[in-house]
Amino acid sequence: MTFKPAKLLIALLVVAVPAFAQNVAVVNGKAIPTSRVDAVVKQVVAQGQQPDSPQLRDLIKKDLIGREVMMQEAEKQGFGKNADVKAALENARQAIIINALVADYVKKNPVSDADIKAEYDRFVAQAGDKEYHVRHILLGTEAEANDVIAKIKGGAKFEDLAKQSKDTGSAANGGDLDWASPSSFPPVFAQAFTALQKGQVTEKPVQTPNGFHVIKVDDVRQAKLPTLEEVKPQVAEALTQKKLQAFQEELVKKAKVQ
């Protein structure tokens, strides 16, 4: 059976049109599929940069054509065989695959509202219901710290004596550490000042790995903690990261590492 020329042309067009429709352009024989444009459009729209439109698709098409031309020239000049380029490509490949694994894991192991509430409650319990405006003077020896305490009892101003503090960051401000919750400090330091009343100074030096501290409480107030709704996204993200860290550590344990 033979086709007449006109029928043959029509048959070829029927076959060719769907194939051509799958590409937005063909650059030096290399096709740029429509799916690549769709993927970039989806990403742009998801990021809220601008809505899908013919103008956007035309810009993306031009960008992909420009990239394809540059890619072909780079391959022509042999950059695809460059050792540094290969290493960068491998790193990018790993990142893309790992990100896909992470996204799948997070989807299958979501953080529940109960987990978020429990974590928030732990934060509130740890932070406590009070904030303290604290000053301190850091000395190198216990004897120096005791000498400072004696001078304060003798009427010397705490702020003046703070100028000799080894903590140069607060020394110029009279030893001021601003308002903070006890959980912001090392336990031994926090235990010392939470036992004080407003205006009181520690009777004995408080030792930490940094040295010996003389501590004063300027004021105490009720803590202004954020509500659960205010910090829910941050708590959820922190718990997600903990899950991912545990997942990775479990995989490392199972792996044969030599």
Image: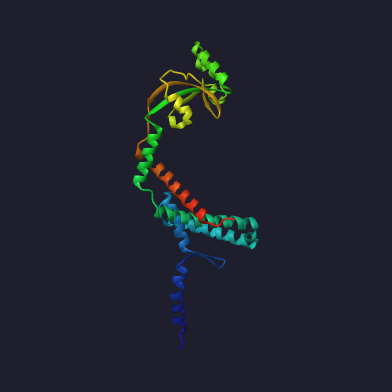
Residue 190 visible in this rendered orientation of the protein = yes
Give the residue displayed 47% in from the left and 83% down from the top: 5
Residue farthest bottom in this picture: 1
**Seen in the image, is 163 located left or right of residue 7?**
right
Q: Quadrant of the C terminus?
A: bottom right
Q: How is the image coloured?
A: rainbow
Q: To which quarter of the image does residue 6 belong?
A: bottom left
Give the residue displayed 41% in from the left and 42% down from the top: 234
169 vs 154, nearest the viewer? 154
Question: Residue 25: percent from the left, percent from the top?
Answer: 50, 64
Give the residue displayed 46% in from the left and 71% down from the top: 19
Question: Residue 13: percent from the left, percent from the top?
Answer: 45, 75
Residue farthest top in this picture: 154
Asked if residue 128 is positioned above or below residue 94 in the image, the reply reads above
Residue 55 visible in this rendered orientation of the protein = no
148 vs 157, nearest the viewer? 148
Number of numbered tags placed on the structure image: 0
3 vs 35, nearest the viewer? 35
Q: Quadrant of the N terminus?
A: bottom left
Asked if residue 67 is positioned above or below residue 174 in the image, the reply reads below
Asked if residue 226 is positioned above or below residue 29 in the image, the reply reads above
Question: Residue 219: percent from the left, percent from the top?
Answer: 41, 21
Question: Residue 42: percent from the left, percent from the top?
Answer: 43, 56
Asked if residue 15 is positioned above or below residue 64 in the image, the reply reads below
Give the residue displayed 46% in from the left and 85% down from the top: 4
178 vs 3, nearest the viewer? 178
